[in-house]
Amino acid sequence: MFDKSILTKIANTVMPFGKYKGRVLIDLPESYLLWFQRQGLPDNELGKLLEIVLSLKIDGSDNLVRPLKK
């Protein structure tokens, strides 16, 4: 489904701004990701990663990423 390097990036990239600044992307609440999606995700790598995190959470696959955290 996704390249392991992308999943590792999701497990270790920190949210750089906003309410959850400093939290690792995979640990962001689904409700926040849904809100952010409605507002418009950034048109950059962060936006793409957030979109993947949201799809993993909706799919129930986010627990597979947690072991990749450093």
Image (cartoon, rainbow, N blue to C red):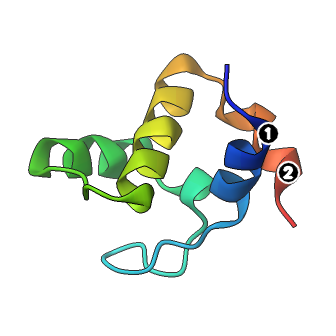
**Circle 1 residues within 10 Å: few <14, some 14–19, many ≥20:** few
**Circle 2 residues within 10 Å: few <14, some 14–19, many ≥20:** some
Query: From the image, which quarter does the C terminus lie in?
Result: bottom right
The residue lying toward the viewer, choosing from 39 and 4, is 4
In this rendering, would 25 be left or right of 11? left
Q: Give the image quarter of residue 9.
A: bottom right
Residue 46 x/y as whole percent:
42, 60
Residue 16 x/y as whole percent:
44, 80
In this rendering, would 50 be left or right of 59? left
Q: Is residue 41 above or below residue 59?
A: below
Q: Is residue 28 above or below residue 57?
A: below
Q: Which mark is residue 4?
A: 1
Query: From the image, which quarter does the N terminus lie in?
Result: top right
Q: Residue furthest left?
A: 39
Q: Work out how far the residue at label 1 is from the one at label 2, CA to CA, in angstroms.
A: 9 Å
Q: Which mark is residue 62?
A: none
Give the amino acid type for the residue marked by disc 1 in the picture.
Answer: Lys
Q: Earlier in the sequence, mark 1 or mark 2?
A: 1
In this rendering, would 66 be left or right of 40? right
Q: Are marks 1 and 2 in contact (CB under 8 Å)?
A: yes
Between disc 1 and disc 2, the foreground one is 1
Residue 34 x/y as whole percent:
28, 40
Which residue occupies 71% across, 44% down? 7
Give the amino acid type for the residue marked by disc 2 in the picture.
Answer: Leu
The residue lying toward the viewer, choosing from 16 and 45, is 45
Residue indicated by mark 2: 68
Which residue occupies 15% across, 50% down? 40
